[in-house]
Amino acid sequence: QSTVSGERLSAAALVDITWFTDSMGAGRLLEIETRHRLQVLGHLLPPSALSNTATGKTPDALKILAENAEYYESVGRYLAFTRVSSILKSLPYAVTSVDSLRGFPGLGEHCRKVIEEILEDGVCQEVESVTQSQRYQTLTLFTSIFGVGVKTAEKWYKEQHQTLADLRASQIRFTKEQQVGLQYYEDLTTPVTRAEADMIRKTVEEAVYRYLPGAVITLAGGFRRGKETGHDVDFLITHPEEGKEKGLVTKVIHFTFCFSQGLMLYSDEIGNSYQKCRKQETSKFDHFERCFTIVKLNQELVNAAVSGNDSREGGQGAGGQGAGGQGAGHRPEDKHWKAVRVDLVIVPISQFAYALLGWTGSQLFERELRRYAKNCKHMILTSHALYHPQQNEYFSAAAEEEIFAHLELDYIAPWERNA
Ligand code: DCT
Ligand code: MG
């Protein structure tokens, strides 16, 4: 097989291993892993084979059902559809009959039926009716607003709101997040490109080095996995001398962004709470000092950098003059900036490898890896540490490779984690 298929397989294989070990016990892990890697290679499916062509939607049919399950807060069904969708997408060849998927891990009756229908008719009626339903459409729209989760979207839907215009004209008391989410809706739902991420990185570097020379800034999230676009830009910031990084967020945000340049459209700072929460190792959230922000990115500078004609003065990446955001659909001709979500996470060096692993994602990959750690190794993996509760032991790691080694897994490179 080509290296591409090999690369794509690891993440999917991990999903499968976990499934197998759940039902068969950890003892047979190695045998199953080897067998299943081969099994996966034996099936054929191009990434587009299961897209629901009738709806013309990019996300595949199972992903739509997963989303819909999420809108009904059914985590189990959401995961079941998402896992099968992810595994199918990683297969390098086309599946032409559902029988060839016999024994396929995690493939339940429901998924089988969907796949069968699409293979036979090109369309799955259930997926069709989901995508045509007002509820699905409205919840998809509302949850795409920054600061709006399923519960809030559902509440607004039940109050008969259906469009962004409805929301804007309503008496709803929006949170600060939702206000900026609506105000910059168009920008925030336009994918961030790698060139834009690189430009933001320069700005973050300038801001951070000013207060903490010697800090190390790492681009994490989807961009580290090799994706060309993302919905935000995630940075981890650390310093080789533990403790030096403390309080950095406040300094960087307040002085550089807010006062000096007015580049910050929104920021939500959270202090480090790891020691306080150390006992809650199972919490799905981490406890780093961090800041979720929305910055003004000067697009002219990005365009200049892309065309190899970077005429920046003083290296100022994000920003631009003039205040005030424009709402969705009101992008004026002379608006030369774009609102972009940037997450800054401040990490003590001793936890950096774990933070990097956690913040590289994908979310499904992290979920499966943690599930594997728990079910097969009886360990708790978080973005801070790897912990064995029965042995009351923490495993230190200076690099991601060491974490995989502690888990007795082959190293999986970031670009293989796009599950
Ligand atoms: N993450 C985390 N804790 C959070 C948010 C995210 O541990 N509160 C992890 C999960 C994946 C990774 O960090 C990056 O998160 P996202 O930006 O949501 O995902 P992404 O893969 O970078 O997606 P995109 O490319 O669209 O930004
Ligand atoms: Mg991201």
Image: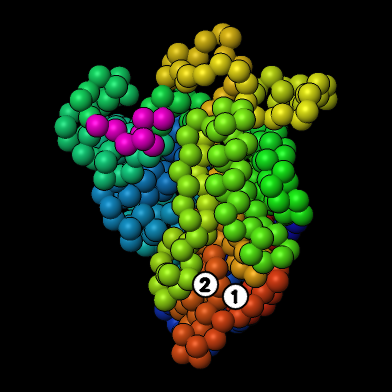
Residue 383 in the figure: left or right of residue 212 = left
**Where in the figure is residue 213, as x and y percent of width and height?**
76, 51
Amino acid on which disc 1 is placed: Glu
Say what secondary structure mark 1 lies in.
helix
Residue 177 in the magenta stretch? The answer is: yes
Give the residue number, with chain letter if any, for mark 1.
33
Residue at 47% over, 20% down:
325
Please report the bounds of the magenta region as a residue range.
173-180
**Where in the figure is residue 332, as x and y percent of width and height?**
52, 10
Amino acid on which disc 2 is placed: Leu
Q: Quadrant of residue 285?
A: bottom left
In the rendered view, tell whether residue 267 sits above or below residue 182: below
Confirm whether residue 228 shows in the render: yes
Q: State whether the magenta stretch is mostly helix, strand or loop.
A: helix
Give the residue number, with chain letter if any, for mark 2.
381
Q: Is mark 1 within 8 Å of ligand 1?
A: no
Q: Are marks 2 and 1 in contact (CB under 8 Å)?
A: no
Outermost residue on the top side: it is 333
Say what secondary structure mark 2 lies in.
strand
Specify the quadrant that holds the C terminus: bottom right
Residue at 20% over, 25% down:
171
Residue at 72% over, 54% down:
215
**Where in the figure is residue 315, as x and y percent of width and height?**
76, 30
Residue at 46% over, 78% down:
375
Residue 193 in the figure: left or right of residue 144 = right
Residue 154, numbered label: none
Residue 375 in the magenta stretch? The answer is: no
Q: Is mark 2 within 8 Å of ligand 1?
A: no
The residue lying toward the viewer, choosing from 355 and 357, is 355
Rendering colour mode: rainbow
Specify the quadrant that holds the N terminus: bottom right
